[in-house]
C-alpha cells in the first residue's frame, strides 16, 4: 500500500532540461516539496555538482550544504534536493573560491542557466503575482509564483503582474503591470526562454488567453498567458539576461555562428 509521496525518481523520468546522462545511474535526485513544481525546478545538488562543479559526488554536496554556506533567496538551505526555480537567487559564500551569486534563468532552448550577477541585482528578486485575495478582517494579500504570501500590497497590483521584492526586508519595492508594450520572458511551452515585448493580448472566453510577443530581432510568436513572466517596463528588463539575450536562433543561424567561431580560432 502506497503511503505518501514517492521517495525516488528514475533517471529516465527526470526532466530533460536537467541534462542528466542516461547511463549515469538508475536514479536521479527527487526534488523536495517546496516553492516550485518538481518539473520546473533545479535541485541544489544538481547546481553544485553538475552545473558549477563545486562538488564531485553526492556526499561532497551534503558536506558543503551542512557548513551552511549556500543561500537561496537570502536564506540558508541545507536540503540537498531543495527546489530552486526560475528567478531564484543562489549565493555561495566562503569557503568557495569566489563569493559568487547566480540567478536562475532560462536559455532559449528551455534549459536553466545559472546567470552570474553582481552589485544591486543581488538584493532583489522578481516574483509573479498568482492571485490577489482578502483574508480575515478584510486584510488584502497576494500569492506569488514561488509560494509567498505578502499582506497589504499596493492596491494597483493585480494577478499576472510582477513585483520587485527586497530579499532582506521581504517588502515590495516596486511592481510591473502586465500590459502591452512591456518586456517579458516566456517560462513554459516551446518558446521557453525567449524574451520579447507584448504586442497583443487575445481573450478567449472559457479557454486560454493568448499573448502575442515580438523579440528584439523582429520575430513574432504566440504563447499562453500562463507561460508569460513580465521582467521589465517598456523594452528595458530589470534583471540582466544570459548570453543571447533571449533571442532564439534558427538551426541555420546557429550553424553559421558555430562556423564563424571555429574560423576565428
Image (spheres, rainbow, N blue to C red):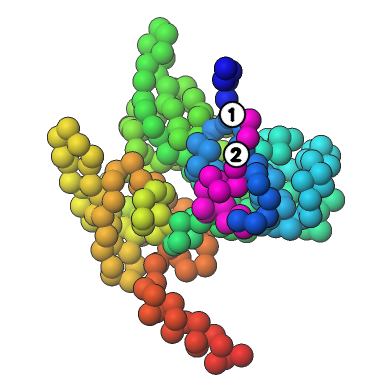
Tell me whether circle 2 and circle 1 mark residues in contact (CB < 8 Å).
yes
Q: Is residue 3 visible?
A: yes
Secondary structure under tag 1 reads loop
Q: Is residue 142 left or right of residue 166?
A: left
Q: How many marks?
A: 2
Magenta stretch containing residue 98, yes or no? no
List x then y, in percent, for residue 217.
33, 71
Residue at the left extreme? Answer: 205
Instruction: Say the numbered circle drawn on residue 114.
Output: none
Task: Tell which of 179 and 110 is nearer to you.
Answer: 110
Residue at the (53%, 38%) spot, across then down: 38
Magenta stretch containing residue 10, yes or no? yes
Q: Is residue 168 visible?
A: no
Eyeballing the image, is 260 above or below 177? below
List x then y, in percent, for residue 80.
71, 39
Question: Which residue bears the numbered disc 1?
Answer: 6
Task: Tell which of 192 and 133 is nearer to you.
Answer: 192
Question: Which residue bears the numbered disc 2?
Answer: 9
Q: Quadrant of the N terminus?
A: top right
Residue at the (49%, 25%) spot, across then down: 149
Residue at the front extreme? Answer: 1
The magenta span reads: 6-21
List x then y, in percent, for residue 23.
65, 57
Density class for disc 2 (Cα within 10 Å; few <14, some 14-19, many ≥20) is: some
Task: Tell which of 161 and 257 is nearer to you.
Answer: 257
Residue at the (74%, 43%) spot, across then down: 70
Q: Is residue 52 left or right of residue 109?
A: right
Secondary structure under tag 2 reads strand
Amino acid at each position: 500500500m502506497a503511503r505518501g509521496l514517492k521517495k525516488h525518481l528514475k533517471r529516465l523520468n527526470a526532466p530533460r532540461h536537467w541534462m542528466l546522462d542516461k547511463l549515469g545511474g538508475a536514479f536521479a535526485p527527487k526534488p523536495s516539496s517546496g516553492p516550485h513544481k518538481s518539473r520546473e525546478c533545479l535541485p541544489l545538488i544538481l547546481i553544485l555538482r553538475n552545473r558549477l562543479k563545486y562538488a564531485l559526488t553526492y556526499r561532497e554536496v551534503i558536506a558543503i550544504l551542512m557548513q551552511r554556506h549556500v543561500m537561496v533567496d537570502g536564506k540558508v538551505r541545507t536540503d540537498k534536493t531543495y527546489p530552486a526555480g526560475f528567478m531564484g537567487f543562489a549565493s555561495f559564500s566562503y569557503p568557495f573560491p569566489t563569493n559568487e551569486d547566480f540567478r536562475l534563468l532560462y536559455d532559449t532552448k528551455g534549459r536553466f542557466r545559472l546567470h552570474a550577477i553582481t552589485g544591486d541585482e543581488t538584493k532583489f528578486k522578481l516574483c509573479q503575482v498568482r492571485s490577489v485575495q482578502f483574508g480575515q478582517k478584510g486584510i488584502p494579500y497576494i500569492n506569488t509564483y514561488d509560494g509567498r504570501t505578502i499582506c497589504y500590497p499596493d492596491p494597483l497590483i493585480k494577478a499576472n503582474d510582477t513585483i520587485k521584492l527586497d530579499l532582506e526586508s521581504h517588502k515590495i519595492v516596486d511592481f510591473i503591470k502586465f500590459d502591452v508594450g512591456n518586456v517579458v520572458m516566456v517560462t513554459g511551452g516551446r518558446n521557453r526562454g525567449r524574451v520579447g515585448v507584448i504586442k497583443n493580448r487575445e481573450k478567449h472566453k472559457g479557454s486560454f488567453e493568448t499573448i502575442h510577443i515580438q523579440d528584439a530581432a523582429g520575430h513574432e510568436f504566440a504563447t499562453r498567458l500562463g507561460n508569460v513572466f513580465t521582467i521589465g517596463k517598456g523594452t528595458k528588463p530589470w534583471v540582466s539576461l544570459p548570453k543571447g539575450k533571449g533571442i532564439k536562433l534558427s538551426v541555420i543561424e546557429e550553424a553559421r555562428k558555430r562556423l564563424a567561431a571555429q574560423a576565428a580560432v
